[in-house]
Amino acid sequence: MKTQCTTASPGATIVIVPPGIPRLETGRRLAAGLIGGEPERIARGVHPDLIELSPMKGKERIGIEQVREVIRVGQFAPVEGVRKVCLIPHGEALTPEAENALLKVLEEPSRDLSFLILVGEAQDLLPTIRSRGRIVRLPSPSPDELAARLGALGYDERVIPYLIGLLSGEELAPFLENRVDVSAAIETARAELDGADLKTAASLAVGEAPIPGYEGTIRILTEVHARGPTAAVAAARGIAGFGRAAGLVFLARTTRVLFAAARRRESLFPPHPGIDRLARADVVALAREAEKARRALEGYTSTEAVLLSFFLQCGGEG
């Protein structure tokens, strides 16, 4: 027996999901409201009216043939629910050809088939697809919600403030999917930085891996604070050598490091003596200067000049 669903459904619902929210779990929960019936089976991904569309094994993108198969299956009436739902947890993975195939079915939507597409930003999809769907933006999870999820995964309570206090939502997302040995990652990064020059620290500070990135950022800030102008020039040149995008990454991480240090020093687990030497007022002022420098760099000012100006404000004993 079909259960009437009270949620109206357009051809596509596009859900903007903030980093840190599990896509598949969230998508299945939303799909349950469209399908009706037994939410427990939908939550497990085993409902006959739920079609989940993700890249095939060994692939990074969702191809046109996969979309065409969904369209073919979607021609049949729902088995148990009010309608069939095709859940695409990562809409960013659709190839341009797959998006165009999807667009054709959205131009003449089926009454019995709805698409639920989750993306990080609306711009991740073609404007023509966005114009044919209803856009819903989910709120970002609170720090308490993130802490609870990290705790449920078995993270040591000492490292949870480090992850929440330093990592941006996008950087935190992988840690919410699978437990990572954060203490070991911090120890490895600090060992690599022990005795390393500022060029090595810069390469870590602007890299993709977040924990070495923040440890490299902390090392640069403390070196500049300790050695003054000489270190400021070397650090600015080192980071600028990786390009403007790297400079923006460094300044964004710097802002988070400094605000975290001012707000809750336990974020710097294990304790970092270099940051601890900075007075709280200095840390807050530098965090604001880092944010101003980031905005200046976004305006296409010289990367090295912006970084040098910021570093020279960091003070120091050199």
Image (tube, rainbow, N blue to C red):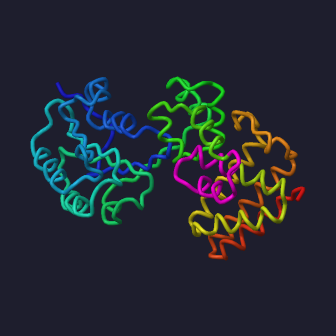
Tell which of 208 and 149 is nearer to you. 208
Tell which of 232 and 141 is nearer to you. 232
At a point 49% along the width and 46% down the height, the residue shown is 18
Residue 54 horizontal/vertical position (percent) = 27, 45
Q: Quadrant of the N terminus?
A: top left
Seen as rendered, the residue at the extreme front is: 195
At a point 69% along the width and 58% down the height, the residue shown is 198
Q: Is residue 9 visible?
A: yes
Residue 294 horizontal/vertical position (percent) = 67, 64
At a point 26% along the width and 35% down the height, the residue shown is 35
Q: Quadrant of the C terminus?
A: bottom right
- Residue range of the region highlighted in magenta in the rendering: 194-218
| Location of residue 152 with respect to 314 vertically, above or below | above
Q: Choose top left, top right, bottom left or bottom right for residue 6.
A: top left
Q: Is 156 placed left or right of 126 in the picture?
A: right
Residue 85 horizontal/vertical position (percent) = 24, 41
Tell which of 233 and 158 is nearer to you. 233
| Location of residue 139 with respect to 81 vertically, above or below | below
